[in-house]
Amino acid sequence: MAPVRFMTWNVHGTFNLNPKFDLEGVCSILRKWAPDVVALQEVDSRSRSDDPFAKLANVVGDHRVHAKSIVTADGDYGQMLLSRFPFSGVPEIVDVSYREREPRRAIATGLLTPVGDVRVVATHLGLSIHERYAQAQALVSLVKPGRTVVLGDFNDWFWVKSVRRVLAQACPNRTRLRTFPSRLPLMRLDRIYATSDSRIEKVWTDVEARAFSDHLPVIADVEIQGPSRA
């Protein structure tokens, strides 16, 4: 059975990098690697005449869900999960916000893939250590014992109270690519995690994406064990 291709990418530029949020460039990278499932963070429609959420909706497949953490009269900000595979149920939008800090969300859903039902959790975690630690514990509660992939921008670079240590309890397999800042990547902020019954066969990034975001994407082919038979 062919592996499932996952991708995660924080697509928002900063300062003089893609200041107009070039959606065509972002879409070209997505089409280039043709992931089966992609999590996008920092999708921002504020102060725009178009709607990036709508424009990105059909780039990967026919199934999508968005989690808007900031909604204003001037537009919205948040994340998206796009999939070639249909959802096996109604996707959950879970509030993982921490106290008075910026609102954060996680998208949790099942996907009907060629290898059966696979659980996917996509998120964008906070900037402080205590915030991320609490959010990581919330993520573990969304992971099923097997056949689960967790992906996103975890903003995780310290080992103390790290997301990595918390998620390792449920998802021991993970990517380890440096993704930020995209011009000279030093930090492994963006990752793909998987439960022990899944194997990350191949993982890579794309330096061409640095023209469109201050994060590099992470793309991984994941071999997921088939459902057990009685």
Image (spheres, helix red, strand yellow):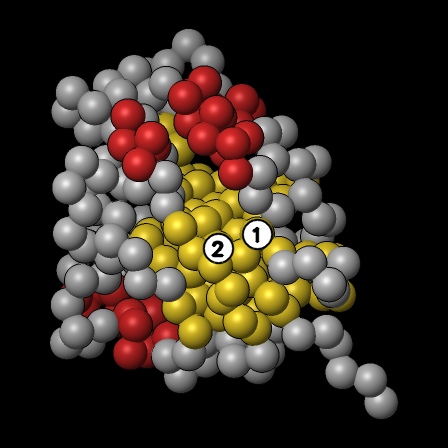
Q: Earlier in the sequence, mark 1 or mark 2?
A: 1
Estimate the x, y position of residue 115 in percent, counting from the top left. 74, 64
Res 71 → quadrant: top left
- Residue 5's tag is 1
Classify mark 2: residues with Cα within 10 Å, few (<14), some (14-19) or many (20+): many
What residue is shown at x 53% (from left), y 71% (from top)?
199
Q: Quadrant of the C terminus?
A: bottom right
Q: Which of the 4 quarters of the picture holds residue 46?
A: top left
Q: Are marks 1 and 2 in contact (CB under 8 Å)?
A: yes
Tag 1 secondary structure = strand
What element does badge 2 sit on? strand
Residue 79 image label: none
Q: Nearer the viewer, residue 209 or 191?
A: 209
Residue 202 image position (x, y, % from top left): 48, 59
- The answer to whether any part of residue 207 appears in the image is yes
What residue is drawn where x is 26% and y is 21%?
18
For the residues marked 1 and 2, what is the alpha-carbon distance in whole angstroms? Answer: 6 Å
Number of labels in the image equals 2
Q: Which residue is mark 2?
A: 220
Classify 10 Å Cα crowding around label 1: few (below 14), some (14-19), many (20 and above).
many
In the visual, does 101 lie left or right of 4? left
Q: Residue at x 45, y 49 (%)?
A: 219
